[in-house]
Amino acid sequence: MATWEHFESEAGELASAVKARFEAAETHVLATLRKDGSPRVSGTEVDFRGPDLSFGSMLNAVKAVDLRRDGRCAIHAHPHQGGDAKVAGVAIEVTGLEKGAYVTGSEPPGDFHAFRLDLHEAVITAVEGDELVIRLWRSGRPVETFRRK
């Protein structure tokens, strides 16, 4: 697992492209796991604070309950021309004094949940000419590129 900063140090060009996709829109799609193991998708906003990709939730929202029980998740950047970006990993709840560093200004009024993503992988998929090009990063490994016609 890795921080966003670690991803940038290992694969700076890909990290920049993925970050640009997330910064191109305000809301994205978060996939979590329900108690029975089935998937749930919810809207979310992300931010890049310090070394981390972070996101929040209204207090006791179902996505937060999912993540507190099982932090495995994926976030898909809002679709846009120029490619899709996705990240996956484990959400770690930020609490106590550290939580104040994760306030984005768009958090709901009152108390809220703050999470940082322990990053397992990042991928950007785009059409280049007549090919679908997939660039995948996993911590400690070089970026892999797959091409499909």
Image (tube, helix red, strand yellow):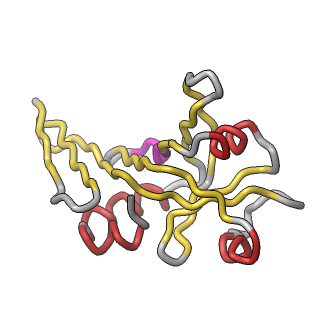
Task: Residue lying at the far right in this picture: please name it.
Answer: 110
In the visual, does 90 lie left or right of 8? right
In the visual, does 122 lie left or right of 37? left
In the visual, does 4 lie left or right of 138? right
Quadrant location, the N terminus: bottom left
The spot of residue 120 in percent (x, y) is 37, 52
The correct choice, above or below, for 38 with respect to 113 in the image is above
- Front one among 111 and 24: 111
Q: Quadrant of residue 94?
A: bottom right
What predominant SS class does the magenta segment belong to? loop
- Front one among 93 and 30: 93
Is residue 37 magenta-colored? no
Q: Measuring 74% from the left and 56% from the top, which residue is drawn there? A: 113
The correct choice, above or below, for 4 with respect to 148 in the image is below
Q: Measuring 57% from the left and 65% from the top, which residue is drawn there? A: 47
Q: Measuring 24% from the left and 66% from the top, which residue is drawn there? A: 11
The spot of residue 9 in percent (x, y) is 29, 74
Quadrant location, the C terminus: top left
Task: Residue lying at the far front in this picture: please name it.
Answer: 69
How many labels sit on residues?
0
The spot of residue 117 in percent (x, y) is 51, 58
Is residue 77 magenta-colored? yes
Which range of residues does the magenta coloring cover?
A: 75-80
Q: Measuring 77% from the left and 41% from the top, which residue is drawn there? A: 61
The correct choice, above or below, for 13 with respect to 38 in the image is below
